[in-house]
Image: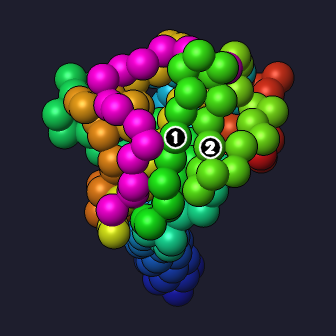
Amino acid sequence: MKKKEGQISELYELVESFVWMLGVLLVVCCFFVRTATVDGGSMFPTLEDRENLLLQVAGCGNASYGDILVVNAPDLAEKVIIKRVVGLAGDTIEIDFDTGEVRRNGELLDEPYINEPTWTWEGVDFPVQVPEGHLFVLGDNRNHSKDSRSPDIGMVDVREIIGRAFFRLTPFARVGSIN
């Protein structure tokens, strides 16, 4: 009889441990870390189509220059976009489509991560000033990216940020942090 009570007690402890572990995992996944999959080539060469990413969820509203964000885009069929932060609230962004240069507050940006200079006009006239509570975002593959240059996306409301990409999960040959 004692052996059976001991087995039931061990089973109860195992189930209890599993429930606690599941609860902690749910809290972490809901409030701290999420995953996202790259859809398309707009962030090439930094990110490639179908790569799986880990996102930092907490504190994403405090984005910095160069952060790669996953953002809700309710006016687009894709609904979610992945782009790099180029401008913060109060910044003036200017793009010279003849030279392909991007300037922030009059300073030419050093962008070693882009695929090619920014030649493609998407409908927004420059210069533009980023309003409070918004970000100006661009894809790294500028001439094949729908981003803040397009009236369909425009300036991104910080409340639409889903997370900041910080780690590549797949493909396994490219696993690691995202710089």
Where is residue 148? Give x, y as percent: 39, 37
Circle 1 residue: 94
Residue sitting at x 48%, y 54%: 92
Residue sitting at x 43%, y 42%: 127
Task: For the residues labelled 2 and 1, say whether their Cβ atoms are less than 8 Å apart.
Answer: yes
Cα–Cα gap, marks 2 and 1: 5 Å
Please state which of residues 7 and 116 is positioned toward the viewer in this rendering: 116
Q: In the rendered view of the protein, which quadrant contains the C terminus?
A: top right
Where is residue 153? Give x, y as percent: 29, 36
Number of the label disc, if any, that sits on residue 103:
2
Please state which of residues 45 and 117 is positioned toward the viewer in this rendering: 117
Residue type marked 2: Arg
Where is residue 131? Give x, y as percent: 33, 62
- Report the number of numbered marks: 2
Residue sitting at x 63%, y 22%: 100
Region rendered in magenta: 117-131
